[in-house]
Amino acid sequence: MKLWLRALLSTMSAFLGVQSNERRERDFIDGKFPVFVAAGITFTLLFLLAVYGLVQFVLWSVD
């Protein structure tokens, strides 16, 4: 479970562009590829859903 949490936090940091070089190197050494792929897909889907929701809200509020 600790691996998943660390992967989620690391992926979120990288997604936002604030990933440190130390953490990135640690991820490449200690991380598991499938965990990072799953975390990346999860954050991408959450981002797309958030953008979609925001657009729907703006379009709803304009009417």
Image (spheres, rainbow, N blue to C red):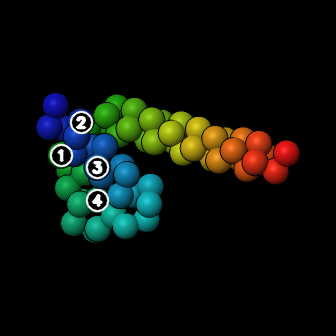
55 relative to 31 in the view: left or right:
right
What residue lies at 36% left-to-right and 49% top-to-bottom?
Answer: 11
Tag in front: 2 or 1 = 2
Disc ID at residue 9: 3
**Earlier along the polypeptide chain: callout 4 or callout 1?**
4
**Amino acid at the residue labelled 2:** Trp
Q: Look at mark 4 in the image and give the residue it sits on.
A: 24
Describe the element under mark 3 as helix, strand or loop.
Answer: helix
The percent position of residue 32, horizontal first and vertical second, equals: 26, 37
Describe the element under mark 2 as helix, strand or loop.
Answer: helix
Q: Nearer the viewer, residue 14 or 33?
A: 14
Above or below residue 59? Residue 37 is: above
Q: CA distance from mark 2 to mark 1?
A: 12 Å
17 relative to 32 in the view: left or right:
right
Q: Look at mark 1 in the image and give the residue it sits on.
A: 30
Question: Which quarter of the rendered picture does the N terminus lie within?
Answer: top left
- Based on the displayed image, in which of its 4 quarters is residue 52 positioned? top right
**Earlier along the polypeptide chain: callout 3 or callout 2?**
2
The percent position of residue 36, horizontal first and vertical second, equals: 35, 40
The percent position of residue 37, horizontal first and vertical second, equals: 41, 36
